[in-house]
Image: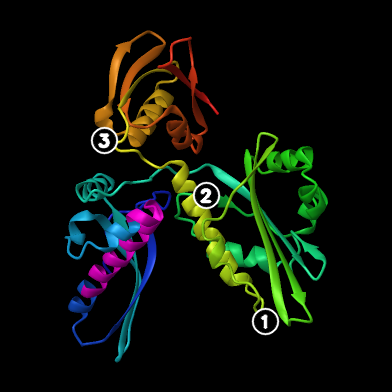
Amino acid sequence: MYSTNCLSSDDIYYIENNEIYLENNGDVLELRENAKILSFKNSFNILAKNILDPDDLKKFEQILSYDITSLVKDYKIESEKISDVNYSAKISVNFNPSKVKDFFVKNGIRLNIFISESYLVFPLYKKFNTLFLWDKDNLWYNSLLSEYDQQSLLKLYFPKKNHINKLRISPNNIIEKNSKKISDFLKIYKKKKAIIIFLEENFDIKKNNFKIKLSISVFNNGNFSTINLTNKDSLPDDSNLSQVDLIAKIVINDLQNWWKNKIDYESASDEKQKKYIINVNNRNIKNSIIIEEILSGIIGKGNLKIKELKTNSTIYEIITNYTIKQINLGLESKNLKLMKIDMEKNKFSIENY
């Protein structure tokens, strides 16, 4: 079995366990090479779907020819099976971030590469006047979890279905918007935000079909805000069968696009570049180096410059198209946030979030 360097599963550029199936032509080396190239293409399509909004994804799909191998950093054949008839393999692919970014920029395609902090999911389900949340019969929970891609930019956390969670918070606590109960539950799992996905299915006996009601909201710092589905018209209605799986697919896809829209990049031609001064505490050298790497990852290494070195801090100057709000979205998953340090608009310190 062939493998290359160890890969990091935490990286959005790492696409894990692509399953490849080919007809066995008798040449193992040729089969492996064909499987490798096919896994590169499949993986890059998955990556593009994860980091591009729908309009830019369409632009990418119109690119007919490019050197996919040049974008790959390394890969690993996790397993393979060879029979007299077939060849199958699972291959993980790790893409080169800078080359991927250059590829999309050269093709006029915007990137959304900020990973969200983890949102705790409340998959609330009502069917035949019965409410489900942490119950083993909550099919809505199962369908949402099944559709969720761990490698997407939007990070979702699904608490386990068990009696302990039933005692901690009930469906009615959520419907009644009991902020204290929700906040206390989030603290148990060390989360700051939640997404409430409430699906109600009712069967109309006279019409012999299901009617659905769907609502999605975010809970953050004691406040609730509604997420409006962009694909609401595609939701199935008036069906004589339950469509929970299909609805879950639409919802998860829409939530991923919701996150990407929050961090939508504005190009230099659309918005003037901004200059910010960032103060990073140097008392812990290791942490300050990590913070520098995080900032570089968000705005690009060439846009981050050391302006001044002090005994206890480093002063950086950054030039970017991103707003402070967008940069903070990128920092949230690292438990960091930019905070103003004086009355001037462009001076900030970086603090724990």
Is disc 1 placed on a helix, strand or loop? Answer: loop
Q: Earlier in the sequence, mark 2 or mark 1?
A: 2
Q: CA distance from mark 3 to mark 1?
A: 51 Å
Look at 36% across and 27% down and name the residue there.
Answer: 292
Mark closer to the observer (2, 1) = 1
Left or right: 162, with 259 as reference point: right
Q: Position of residue 170 (x, y in %)?
A: 80, 52
Q: Which mark is residue 240?
A: 1
Give the residue pinned by disc 2: 155
Q: Relative to 349, say whether 58 is above or below.
A: below
Left or right: 31, with 51 as reference point: left
In this view, the residue in front, 7 or 239, is 239
Instruction: Give the position of the N terminus as an image quadrant.
Output: bottom left
Q: Earlier in the sequence, mark 2 or mark 3?
A: 2
Q: Relative to 65, say whether 106 is above or below.
A: above
Left or right: 203, with 107 as reference point: right
What span is in magenta? 34-56
